[in-house]
Image (cartoon, grey):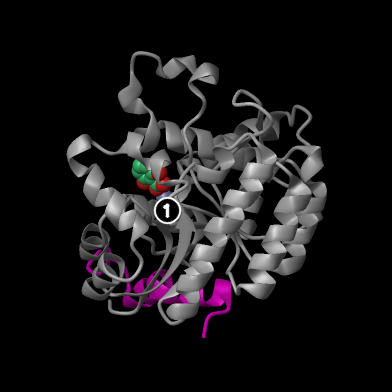
Amino acid sequence: MKNKIALEEHFAIDLTIGDSQVYARPEVWAGLKSNLLDFEQQRLDQMNAWGTEFSILSLNSPAVQAIPDTRRAIEVAMRANDVLAEQVRRHPARFGGFAALPMQNPDAAARELERCVKELGFHGFLVNGFSQVGNADTVVYYDAPQFAGFWQAAAALGKPFYMHPRDPLASREPIYDGAHWLTGPTWAFAMETSIHTLRLLSSGLFDRHPELQMILGHFGEGIPFNIWRVDHILRKGRRGMPCEKEIGDYLRSNVHLTTSGNFRTPTLLSSMLEVGSDRIMYSVDYPFEKHEDAARWFDRCEISENDRQKIGRDNARKLFGLA
Ligand code: GRE
Ligand code: ZN
């Protein structure tokens, strides 16, 4: 498939590149670093070689979310968004943008999102999980009451947001002690991101803003596989859960999944059975994953050509209102 659209594709700036080093073996770091900092060479070459026409780009992880100093978080987010905006201006047919946001200050985050959407033409925002605020050990999740105004502003702009992984703080997750190979993309990313998402879905956020749409990578960080059990248990007793519907109802009306970093046909088919092919979109997770691996799998996996067209391109065109 030649004209795919990809949605979880990362870049870094000088101020955030260091955050990705812990995820690279020493022998591959130079290459990954160069891929993250590049826009116009390796990135476009790989998109061309493997049939991605358009990538919506986002900052690396955790970046802004891991800057406890609010003023600094605001500065770094604006710097990254300005760098991205310049590339979108240079290549409007190839690159779109997700805003990085200083969620440490919900009002500043709303203002920056508005600037990114209205002035820079971005397609929504991507947050790397919880934010550290004030000091490294204080974390906020976005179902907290102080985000009510932020969500109102975000919903009013009519653009989706991407909930992207970060690792939990080691101080709060001793279960990974002595088994650090399970942190990061192996397992901890999905656990952290799925719980944050379940918090948002069950908080009433999507009752207040039923049009708000969110995106999860990696085929939903495990949520689709377990959603029946989640609702089955809560049907026996809601235990104070404030939302109006079942969590699966929001999964099927407010969440979209991408294929990022999870190139596996049984997982795709199971996700299609759970949420339908209208809510699944192609993505790579470049440069942490290879366009080659994503495209070799997706272009030939055994689904209907109608579904391939939707998942590879048309669902994203619709969701983002692309030409
Ligand atoms: C990502 O942001 O997608 C990512 C990392 C680190 C390792 C793997 C990965 O930040 O996919
Ligand atoms: Zn990613």
Which residue corresponds to mark 1? Answer: 12
Who is closer to the viewer here, 117 or 269?
Answer: 117
Residue 312, quarter of picture: bottom left
* Pointer 1 local density, CA inside 10 Å: few below 14, some 14–19, many at least 20: many
* 101 lies above or below 29: below
**Residue 222 in picture, x, y percent from top left:** 45, 41
229 shown above or below 277: above
Q: Residue at x 74, y 41 (%)?
A: 203
Q: Residue at x 43, y 82 (%)?
A: 93
Instruction: Evaluate whether residue 173 shows in this view.
Output: yes
Number of residue marks: 1
What's the magenta bit mostly, secondary-structure-wise? helix
Task: Say whether residue 323 is left or right of residue 105.
Answer: left
Query: Residue 278's spot in the image, x, y percent?
Result: 50, 68
Q: Amino acid at mark 1?
A: Ala
Residue 109 placement, left or right of 291: right
Work out whether residue 205 or residue 229 is closer to the camera in this orientation and state it: 205
Give the quadrant of the N terminus: bottom left
Magenta segment boundaries in residue numbering: 298-323
| Residue located at (61% from left, 23% from top) | 137
Question: Circle 1 — which element?
Answer: loop
Query: Can I make out residue 210 in this image?
Result: no
Q: Residue furthest bottom?
A: 323
Determine the residue positioned at 70% across, 52% down.
109
